[in-house]
Image (cartoon, grey):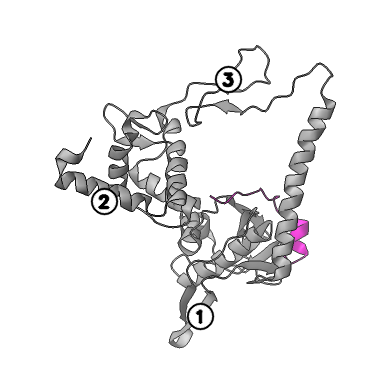
Amino acid sequence: MTSESSAEPISLAEIAKGEGNRLDFKGGFNPQLTGDWCELIKDIVSMANSGGGQIIVGLNDNGEPSGENVTAFLALDLADIANKIYKYTDHHITNLTVERLDMADSEVAVVTIGGLHLPVIFSVPGEYEWPAGKKKTAFAKGTMYFRHGAKSEPGTTEDLRATLERELQRVKGFWLDGIAKVVAAPPEAHVQIVAPTVSLANEGTQSIRLTAKGEGPEFRVVDNDQLYPYRAKELKQRVSEELGANVFSPYDIQCVRKEFAVDENPNFSYKGKFGTRQYSEAFVEWLSEQHRRDGQFFQKAREYARSRMRNPASGT
C-alpha cells in the first residue's frame, strides 16, 4: 500500500492567490458523468504525487463562486472516491478529506489531498465521451501526472527528482529526530527500539516489561476484528494491493490453507463460533512474500491440491 502524508487545511488567503501547484478550482461536478470523474481523479493523483494540495469544487478559474450546486459532491462517500481512484491506478489513496466551505453566500466543497511518499502511475486510461461523439483522454495508461503550476500534466525527470528529494528530506528528518532523542537522553539511560503496541500480528517472540511509566510498549486486549480484519474477499483485495496484481482466486486460498495448515496458526487466521474465517495482516505479508519468492506459488498449491484429490493416498 502506498504511504501518505497529511496536507494543511486551505485558507481564504490562499484561495485569493488563485490556482497553482497546490490548489485547483472546478466550477462544478456531476457524479453521473465519467468525464467529471476522470478529470477529478487526474487532479487528485497529480496533487498527491506532487506532495498534496486542495481542490475546490464550486469555484470558477478566477476563484469566484460558480453558483453550481455542490450538494451531490458533498454527499459522496470518501470510500467511493477512493474506489474510483483505485479503478484507474490499482492503488488506494485514502488520505483525503471533503469539507463544506461557505464563500460569498455560496457553498463550495474543499477536497484536501495528502502527499504520497512514492508517485502513483495510471494503470487504466481515463477516457470519456466528448460532445459530438468524440472521445477524450484525460490521462493515458502508464503515465504519471504532477502539478505544473495550475495544470495537471505528465511527469518529467525534474518531477521525479523533486519527489525523491522530498522523500529523502522526510527520511532525513525522521533520522535526525531519533538521533536528537538519543543525544538528549541522560548518561544512565538505555536506548531501546520498541513497537508502540504488542500484537499477535508480529512474528516471533516479543519482550515486554511491566512498568508504571508511559514510555514502554502498550499491551492491550483487542477484539478479533482488529487482529484479523480480512475476510476472504478483503484478503484477496489486500494481497492484490500489496503485490500490485490479482494473482490468486478464493479457491487458491483454500488450497494454501490445507497445504500449509494455515487454520492451525493463530498468527494467520481465526474463526469464531458463528462467523466465517478471518485473516490477519501477518497472513497478508506471508502470502505476498511467498509469491515474490516464487511467482508460481498459488498455481503450485492449486495443482498440489488437485493431485491429492485425484490420488488421496498420496496425501499426508
Could you tell me residue 26's position as x and y percent? Answer: 61, 68
* CA separation in Å, label 2 and label 1: 45 Å
Foreground pick, 79 / 162? 162
The residue at the far front in this view is: 314
Q: Amino acid at mark 3?
A: Ser
Q: Which residues are magenta?
A: 1-21
Measured in 3D between alpha carbons, the distance from the residue under mark 3 to the one under mark 2, in whole angstroms, is 41 Å
**Can you give x and y, in whole percent of width and height, for residue 244 in the image?**
48, 56
Q: Earlier in the sequence, mark 3 or mark 2?
A: 3
Q: Nearer the viewer, mark 3 or mark 2?
A: 2
Give the residue displayed 58% in from the left and 61% down from the top. Answer: 120
Q: Which residue is mark 1?
A: 136
Q: Is residue 65 visible?
A: no
Q: Quick one: label 1, few (<14), some, or many (20+) residues within 10 Å? A: few
Residue indicated by mark 2: 303
Q: Quadrant of residue 316?
A: top left
Of 93 and 280, the residue lying toward us: 280
Q: Main secondary structure of the magenta part?
A: loop
**Residue placed at 65% from the left, 48% from the top?**
5
* Earlier sequence position, callout 3 versus callout 1: 1
